[in-house]
Amino acid sequence: MQVSLPISPSKIPSIFPFHHPIFPLQQPQKNLTFQTQASPFNSLKTAGYLSSISRAIDEEEEYRKARAAVTRKGIEIEGYFIEGLSIGGHETCVIVPELKSAFDIGRCPSRAIQQNFVFITHAHLDHIGGLPMYVASRGLYNLKPPTVFVPPCIKEDVEKLLDIHRTMGNVELNLDLVALDVGETYELRNDIVVRPFRTHHVIPSQGYVIYSVRKKLKKQYIHLKGKQIEKLKKSGVEITDIVLSPEVAFTGDTTAEYMLDPRNADALRAKVLITEATFLDDGYSVDHARQHGHTHLMEIIEHAEWIRNKAVLLTHFSSRYSVEDIRQAVLKLQSKVSAKVVPLTEGFKSMYTQ
């Protein structure tokens, strides 16, 4: 049975059922009688009480500001606000709220729950582990069942995984699980579609390109006047072509080999390319990166001529790197491409932080 609770800013529901209240029930308030003349002793007590309330209010305000700062973390890039975490071997979930989408689900960060679409690139736990929690949380908050895209070869196993959680937790996990193969197209809404593209990891994997959809008048009708075009349209003639423009591409875990595949050209000309760069320096070789199904920054630099994107968001750095290491690596790539290069560094520490 699925339990649905309203979202309240002061009380976050739990996905686990309880047989008894966690907190004692509030006693009904009694009528209070106040003295009209306060003694000095009572005045001191009142002053201390008010001071305590004031401190509590100040602390609550500071906490609220700190939480707001956390939720605002992210990057404005080519008209998209992109946020999330991507730490190699730990968790990856990259969120694009404008598209109501999360690429991979990691450990299901709370910000991902509001996204209607999840695109799973492969079955490693740091990319798919939070899927049952994501689906359960959507149901708990009375949000519509999400649409989750997976490579066709793992769909059956994902269904088994969700069935296990349904049985163990005695809960409903409602979703639309879509096996979407490389080259297939799925309409997310009337002006947005998605297509997977081939990537190269140590297990089956795929990336995704999100396209905007618009209609463009066919060339043979460009010379016509408005009334003529309207007449053709009313007669049932198809006067427009459908034009797909790649907006956002996400690779997931992969070697740099995807950059050399002509069939992946759209990923390299999307407005924003979100690609992994697990290794950044000589501490690990390019061969090591390839053997483990990952990309070394040196390979991205080597193939920089193929990058036609307006912006490149680097993700999935090894946890051995500091924020300063990552920023230094960005400068190396930035000098080789015209695209704006930005790193996703949430979750990484500064070398100056104890």
Image (cartoon, rainbow, N blue to C red):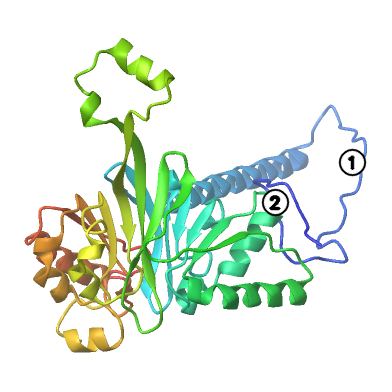
In the figure, is residue 290 to the left or right of 151? Answer: left
Q: Considering the numbered disc 2 on the image, is that residue within a helix, a strand or a loop?
A: loop
At a point 44% along the width and 54% down the height, the residue shown is: 70
- How crowded pointer 1 is (Cα within 10 Å; few <14, some 14-19, many 20+) is rated as few
In the image, what residue type sits under mark 2? Lys
- How crowded pointer 2 is (Cα within 10 Å; few <14, some 14-19, many 20+) is rated as few
Residue 102 in percent (x, y) is at 46, 57
Q: Count the labels in the image.
A: 2
Q: Which mark is residue 11?
A: 2
Residue 321's place in the image compared with 101, above or below, is below
Indicate which disc, 1 or 2, sits on the residue closer to the N terminus. 2
Residue that protrudes farthest toward the top in the picture? 227
In the image, what residue type sits under mark 1? Gln
Residue 271's place in the image compared with 235, above or below, is below
- Depth check: give the residue in front, 234 or 243: 234
Tell me where residue 328 sits by quadrant. bottom left
Tell me where residue 303 sits by quadrant. bottom left
Q: Considering the numbered disc 1 on the image, is that residue within a helix, a strand or a loop?
A: loop
Quadrant in which the C terminus appears: bottom left
Marks 1 and 2 sit apart, C-alpha to C-alpha, by: 21 Å
In the figure, is residue 347 to the left or right of 151? Answer: left
At a point 10% along the width and 53% down the height, the residue shown is: 338
Quadrant in which the N terminus appears: bottom right
For the residues labelled 1 and 2, say whether their Cβ atoms are less than 8 Å apart.
no
In the figure, is residue 337 to the left or right of 38? Answer: left
The answer to whether any part of residue 178 appears in the image is: yes
Tell which tag, 1 or 2, sits nearer the viewer: 2
Residue 65's place in the image compared with 258, above or below, is above
Residue 324 in percent (x, y) is at 21, 68
The answer to whether any part of residue 285 appears in the image is: no
Which residue, given by chain and number where applicable, does mark 1 sit on?
29
Tell me where residue 343 sits by quadrant. bottom left
